[in-house]
Image (cartoon, rainbow, N blue to C red):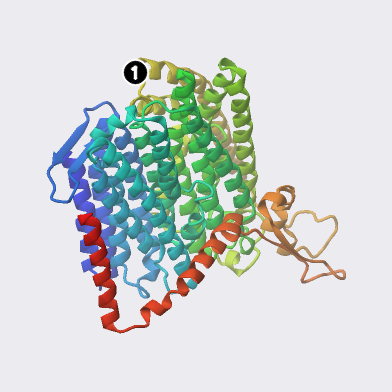
Amino acid sequence: MVLMLLSVAVLVVSGFAALLGLRSARIATCIGVGGAVIGCAIGLIPALGVLLGGEVESLHLAWSVPYGSFFVQLDALSAFFIVVILAISALTAIYGGEYLWPWRDKKLLGPPWFFFNMLVASMVMVVLARNGVLFLMAWEVMALSSFFLVTFEDERESVRVAGRTYLVATHLGTAFLLVMFILMGREAGSLDFDQFQKLSGTPKAFGGLLFLLAIIGFGTKAGFMPLHVWLPEAHPAAPSHVSALMSGVMIKMGIYGLARVLTFLGPPPLWWGWLLVSIGLSSGILGVLFALAQHDLKRLLAYHSVENIGIIALGLGVGLLGISEGSPALVVLGFGGGLLHVANHAVFKSLLFLGAGAVSHGTGTREIDQLGGLLKRMPWTAFTFLIGAVAISGLPPLNGFVSEFLIYLGAFGGGISLKAGAAVPLFGLIAGLALIGGLAAACFTKAFGIVFLGLPRSKHGQHAHEAGWFMRIPMLLLAASCVLIGLLAPIALSILQPVVQQVSGFPANVVHENLAVAAWALRLVAPIGAALLGLIGFLALLRRTLLANRKVEESITWGCGYALPTARMQYTASSFAQPLTDLFKPVLGTRKKVSAPRGYFPSDAALKTETPDMFSEKIYEPVFMRIGTGLSRLRWLQQGSVQLYILYIALTLLALLIWKLW
């Protein structure tokens, strides 16, 4: 535990040191990046030790905070999430050092590095905390530090709006968590997590209430639909390395919190599992559909975070169904797939956000329709983005396939072994997961094809330049991780075993037996995948060798005799996605604006689409507008003298005194 707390201390101290180095961008950057990397490296040592079978470490000290205690513990579940947090944080910090450098003459770089390191430290404390007060304090620091990172470019109105949306959403979620911890502490007699084990014997109605509070409180942070509305606003607004950290890691704190609470509540009733499955399917399908309709590259990726959180929720829901139905295979493979997807999503989504940041850095825009032809100008970014796109689509042999395969396998096994009442919905779950994968593949075919292939559609694509090596190296390492986790999936499953054992409550032999079945199947996939990657590499090398001594010329492709091809004749983001957006128009509500071609050489023909978030437009905006209108009627309370405000305070204190005496 000493090394773990030292890691947190290094992150906090380096953050303050970067803040004090305000006037020197170079010093602030070196301290911020260096402190983040060193702190993460220190923390990875004990976390990996516990995850690989070491003893649980804990520290419990008295604390003067009411109902609080400084109770921290590093067990298998915490260690798993900490490894993800620290690995991604170190890579995004290295990337961020170069990414933020162009702002050195416009903004002070000390504050963003202070908040970055505080965000990493607070996430570590969230998963270490074993007391409700300590947990909520770390949770609040995480919310505030990420808010200031999101609003880095606060001179832009859209960024300020995104920051306000995020701040309101995260505090609404925290309000539900506060109620949950109050109820849990009242029932257990303490806010220490080790006392929450008493909750397993509480009435089912009380346990169901706690579960719903956890779903709303943690689901808001994770991005469950329809609690996701902050996510597609905040992630595009934040700097790209922050977007990668928030999407790849921070939203998983909601998944961690939900998994931790599930270990307190005892055997779940059947409806808990089906609720999570329903949330997972709706988040997954709607998330990828809204992503497909986007024109901003980072906004597209933000909606894919909703989709992948849905896949994680599917896995956890399958695990809960397995406990309710008494099916160990369903439990182990469901929880295993969901938790492994936490790590896999952190890897490929961070890679994709860093790739989007490199595109924005090299072209000056994130608008997909303004790009094109970047494969030749930014080959490293294109190569790594392609790997991330294949991984997020769940295609073998990369890591996204492995975790989704576990969920498929668990649901298929449950569909065969369970009675018809549970089997039929599980086969529906398989169909839903397959639909998510197919739509994701279509979406990233659009994203990669329009951004990196074809001809540049504007000056942004024509003048693009590759990112520097401090931005490339993290992308290359993450791309390599996508490949290695996919090819070494059986090893990944063996590392995951103690985590699944802790969440499921099953003995080690049962967990090992069921994971071994999945590992056996994946051992067949890995050699085929390795052979496929080897063949691709061999053909690329062969092509390069054959062309080495030949003159290679470029020419336009055959255009059916048309002599004046232009970049405007290529697919746009709107036209590529049109068949699917038209098919799902009742759900998406996509609006079209068509400029029909006129004459032989039309210059203004175009198809443009707009797909607003229906939850934000139809639910949240009207509700908050009415709340604002109602509160505006109370402005007369602020139009008084100081004596009137003193009267308000006195009346409040008197009411509290009477309530206390009563």
Report the label total: 1
- Which quadrant: the C terminus? bottom left
- Quadrant for the N terminus, please: top left
Q: Could you tell me which secondary element the residue under label 1 belongs to?
A: loop
Q: Residue furthest bottom?
A: 641
Q: Is residue 243 above or below residue 204?
A: below
Front residue of 623/501: it is 623
622 w.r.t. 193: above or below: below
Q: Is residue 383 visible?
A: no
Furthest-front residue in view? 662
Looking at the rendered structure, the kind of residue marked 1 is Pro
Q: Position of residue 503 (x, y in %)?
A: 36, 29
Q: Looking at the picture, does residue 20 appear above or below residue 70?
A: below
Residue 211, percent from left and from top: 41, 38
Residue 527 lies left or right of residue 123; in this view the side is right
What x and y, as percent, mark residue 35?
A: 24, 54
Identity of the residue drawn at 30% across and 66% down:
111
Q: Position of residue 452 (x, y in %)?
A: 60, 54
Decide if residue 374 is in sight here. yes
- Mark 1 Cα within 10 Å, few/some/many (few <14, many 20+)? few
Name the residue carrying label 1.
507
Query: Nearest the camera: 606 or 580?
Result: 580
